Image: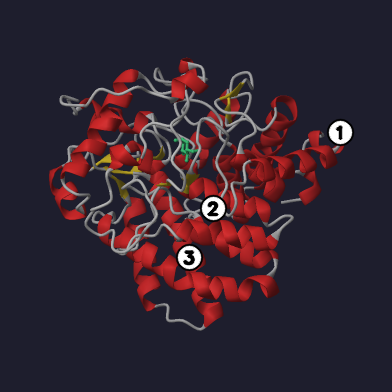
Amino acid sequence: MTDVFDTIDAEPLDREAERILRLNDRGGYTVPTEGLYPYQWNWDSAFAGLGFAAFDIDRAWTEIETLFSGQWGNGMVPHILFHRVDAGYFPGPDVWGTEDALGRGACKVPSSGISQPPVVASLAWRIYLADPTAGHDRLAALFPKLLAYHRWIMAARAESGAVAITHPWEAGRDNAPDWDEAMAGIDPVGVAPYTRRDTGHVDPRMRPTQADYDRYIWLVQFARERRWDEAAIAAESPFRVADPTMTFTALRSTRDLRLAAELLGAGTDEIDGWIARLEDGAAMLWNPETGAYDARNLRTGNFAGSVSNASFLSWWAGLEDRRPLETLRRVMTGARYVLPSHDLSAVSFDHLRYWRGPVWAIMNYMAASGMAEQGLTAEGARIRADTVRLIVENGFAEYFSPSDGTPAGGATFTWTAAVWLAWASPSRGEA
Ligand code: GLC
């Protein structure tokens, strides 16, 4: 570990991180941050649960249980649950129009029509490990719901073996260069007039462009016109991209689900089948030209040519493959703070613009934990030390510039605080 761990006093930052989770608690669920994101988001909530597990185990489980109150009849767990409508966010439930969606079943919580990286089984497993006595029955009650979610992922998104997204928001990396080719293939005609709300909360230089937004809304309308029918969307949408974030988080979560199945005495054959398929799918994402795992446009077969922080989640996914190391080391040498969400040497790199450059604490947590588990100790330690420095120097921001550490996006951010409490804080000891 670098000396940053010897010189900082973790205690006040631990208290501040706890304060942020309480501040963003809306009663049973946590918003990512006040104003910019006033609802419950899928993977944000899973991380919030992990953060709560450091000081309030009951609240941690409640977070996950509230997320699953929005699970659709077909198993899908939506990317946003609109528990209480808030005019400060666009697009709201009226735009998504999922009330009569096929697959929705009896679910009563208004929601979006897409999902997000399925980290929840992995993080629920960690919440269980934080206090097995308190967690056993909660995990047992959640297990069939997790299983249904993964069954849906495999049926609705994993036709190539890798997990595909139907919308950039589904990857949780909204404007990543990974989707540029597929997004350029969309002509956003017929988008109903709308007003963005995000740029009223945050500097537009830190957000997606207008061209991106028109296509985001066009894709929502496209799916809505098909009543969110997965089969029709898969057959007809111009946008279907196999994504390393989805694939690697799904693979890791499936392995963690298997641990839960063993603990609970449930069968593992179906889960083993998923692991084998996802491993095959991950192999398809290896891009020999960039020397990294990459997104792949399923409509053209083309790689995106993007070296991102998602590229380095392969170790978190449990792949022992050492081929990405050379590229990882090059990226780490070039950035002042790692892991950048996009390669600093790429022309499309932009140090403040969301997923086209900035560092995200949640991605650092997963990437570094995977590396540490697989003996890449120095790389994991550097990522953790940089995460600590970013937070100590700049606060619990949504994301940070890899070039100079500038805090960007929303402040007092739930998942940044959660990752601090669960992993980065020096009070957690050696990870
Ligand atoms: C942005 C991020 C996404 C996150 C959401 C709420 O859309 O790209 O990953 O879940 O904000 O924090």
Looking at the picture, tell me which residue is in the foreground, 369 or 44: 44
Front tag of 1 and 2 = 2
The quadrant the N terminus occupies is top right
Q: Residue 255: horizontal and vertical position, in percent?
A: 48, 65
Say whether disc 1 or disc 2 marks the residue closer to the N-terminus: 1
Residue found at the far bottom of this picture: 265
Disc ID at residue 266: none
* Residue 383 x, y percent position in the rendering: 64, 38
The kind of residue tagged 2 is Ala
Alpha carbons under labels 2 and 3: distance apart: 17 Å
Can residue 318 be seen from the camera position used here? Answer: no
Residue bearing the label numbered 3: 255
Q: Residue at x 82, y 34 (%)?
A: 3
Circle 3: residue type: Arg
What's the CA distance linking mark 1 and mark 2?
Answer: 31 Å
Query: Does 299 sit above or below residue 369?
Result: above
Tell me if residue 349 comes above or below residue 42 in the rendering.
above
Kindly tell me whether residue 118 is visible in this rendering.
Answer: yes
Q: Earlier in the sequence, mark 1 or mark 3?
A: 1
Going by the image, does 11 lie left or right of 253? right
- Residue that appears at 71% across and 58% down: 56
- Say the numbered circle drawn on residue 7: 1
Which residue is painted at 80% across and 47% down in the image?
Answer: 427
Circle 2 residue? 46
Q: How many marks?
A: 3
